[in-house]
C-alpha cells in the first residue's frame, strides 16, 4: 500500500521584506499564490527512511536527511512515537532552488502522505505546526490557494481570489540559495531604514477581483534587487518577457526563476515562445493559479 500526494509550486505576488531580526530571519508580508506546477510525493512502507527522486532536476535534489521530505517524515514519526520507516519517492516538476517553494512542497507532501499512510489522525493545526518547523514557506505548500504570510512567512491568512491568473515561468540554469539572497538583501540595505513590511491593499484588491492588469500594476518583490545582484543575467530574461507583452515581469521569490503575469492563455503562449527563442533561460513553463494546496491523490 502507498499514498501519493500532489503539491503545487508558488509565486509571490508581493514579497515585502523587513530588516534582519535578531534570529537572522526577516519579517515578511508575503502574498503567496499557488500555481499549477506540481511535485508528487509517494510514501510506501520500507525497512528504513529512504528518499528517491525522478525528474529533469532530480540530480540536484539531496536524498539525505537534509531533504525536507525526510525531515517531515522524521518529525511526524517522532511526534507519534513511531519509526520513520518509509520510502519517499519524489516526482519532481517544480524547479530545484528556484524560488518556487519546490523543497517546501516536498516537505508538505511527505508530511501529508505519511500522515495518511500511518493513520496518525493529526489535526490540521498539528500538521501546520510541523510545517512551520520545517521552513517558512512549508505551511503555504500545505494550504495552497492564496494567502498572506506574516512573521517569517509561516503565519497564514487565507485570501479570497476572484479569478484565474495566467503565468509564464522562465527557469534559469542552476539555483540560488535562499539564505544567500537574504544575505545580499542585508548587504544592499545596510545603513538604510528598512520599513516594516505591510501587505499592499492594491495587491489584495486585485486578487479579490481577479484583475490581472490591476495585479500586474501592484506586484512587488523586495528580494528582486538581491537576486539580480547575484545573477545579473536575469535582467535580460525579464526584458524578453516584458517585450513579448507580459503585464508584469518579476523574480519569483528568491529566484532565479522569473515569473511573467499575462492576460490569458493566448498571451502566455506568446510570452513562452519569445522566452524559448531568446536563449535567456533553461526552460519555460506555463501555469495558472490559484490551485489547491497538498492533496492526497
Ligand atoms: O525558513 P526557511 O528554512 O525556508 O529559510 C531559509 C533561509 O532563508 C533562512 O535560514 C534565512 O536565511 C532566510 N529567511 C529569512 N527570513 C525569512 C525566511 C527565510 O531570512 N522570513
Image (tube, rainbow, N blue to C red):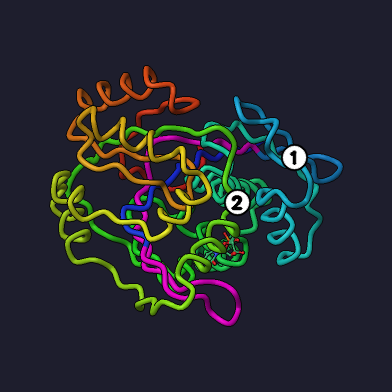
Say if the magenta span includes residue 134: no
Q: Where 44 falls versus 71 (above or below)?
A: above
Q: Earlier in the sequence, mark 1 or mark 2?
A: 1
Range of the magenta residues? 16-42
* Residue found at x 57% / y 63%: 183
Q: What residue sits right under mark 2 in the picture?
A: 177
Q: Tag 2's secondary structure? A: loop
Q: Is residue 271 left or right of residue 57?
A: left
- Within 10 Å of the Cα at label 2, are there few (<14), some (14-19), or many (20+) other Cα atoms? some
Q: CA distance from mark 1 to mark 2?
A: 22 Å
Residue for badge 1: 51
Residue drawn at (56%, 55%) of the image? 178
Q: Residues within 10 Å of mark 1 (few under 14, many from 20)?
A: many
Nearer the observer, 39 or 222: 222
**Percent x, y of residue 161:** 22, 52
Residue 276 sits in quarter: top left
Write down the quadrant of residue 245 in the picture: top left
Please, what is the dominant secondary structure of the magenta stretch?
A: strand
Q: In screen coordinates, is 209 left or right of 186?
A: left
Question: In this image, 120 relative to 49: left or right?
Answer: left
Task: Determine whether 158 is above or below 65 in the image.
Answer: below
- Residue 256 spot, x, y in % from top left: 49, 43
Which residue is at 32% across, 19% downward? Answer: 273
* Cβ at disc 1 under 8 Å from ligand 1: no
Residue at x 66%, y 48% (from the top left corner): 69
Amino acid at each position: 500500500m502507498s499514498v501519493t500526494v500532489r503539491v503545487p509550486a508558488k509565486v509571490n505576488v508581493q514579497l515585502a521584506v523587513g530588516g534582519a531580526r535578531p534570529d537572522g530571519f526577516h519579517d515578511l508580508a508575503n502574498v503567496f499564490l499557488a500555481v499549477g506546477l506540481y511535485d508528487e510525493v509517494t510514501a510506501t512502507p520500507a525497512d528504513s527512511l529512504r528518499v528517491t527522486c525522478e525528474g529533469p532536476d532530480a540530480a540536484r535534489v539531496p536524498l539525505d536527511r537534509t531533504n525536507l521530505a525526510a525531515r517531515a517524515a522524521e518529525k511526524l514519526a517522532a511526534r507519534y512515537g513511531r519509526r520513520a520507516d518509509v520510502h519517499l519517492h519524489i516526482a519532481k516538476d517544480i524547479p530545484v532552488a528556484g524560488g518556487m517553494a519546490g523543497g517546501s512542497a516536498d516537505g508538505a507532501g511527505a508530511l501529508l502522505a505519511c500522515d495518511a499512510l500511518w493513520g496518525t489522525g493529526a489535526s490540521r493545526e498539528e500538521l501546520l505546526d510541523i510545517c512551520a518547523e520545517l521552513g517558512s514557506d512549508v505551511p503555504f505548500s500545505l494550504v495552497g490557494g492564496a494567502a498572506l504570510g506574516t512573521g517569517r512567512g509561516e503565519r497564514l491568512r487565507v485570501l479570497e481570489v476572484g479569478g484565474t491568473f495566467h503565468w509564464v515561468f522562465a527557469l534559469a540554469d542552476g539555483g540560488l540559495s535562499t539564505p544567500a539572497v537574504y544575505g545580499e538583501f542585508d548587504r544592499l540595505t545596510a545603513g538604510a531604514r528598512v520599513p516594516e513590511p505591510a501587505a499592499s491593499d492594491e495587491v489584495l484588491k486585485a486578487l479579490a477581483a481577479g484583475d490581472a492588469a490591476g495585479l500586474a500594476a501592484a506586484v512587488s518583490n523586495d528580494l528582486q534587487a538581491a537576486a539580480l545582484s547575484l545573477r545579473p543575467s536575469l535582467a535580460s530574461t525579464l526584458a524578453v518577457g516584458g517585450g513579448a507583452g507580459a503585464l508584469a515581469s518579476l523574480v519569483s521569490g528568491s529566484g532565479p526563476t522569473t515569473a511573467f503575469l499575462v492576460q490569458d492563455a493566448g498571451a502566455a503562449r506568446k510570452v513562452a515562445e519569445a522566452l524559448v527563442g531568446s536563449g535567456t533561460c533553461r526552460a519555460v513553463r506555463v501555469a495558472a493559479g490559484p490551485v489547491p494546496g497538498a492533496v492526497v491523490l
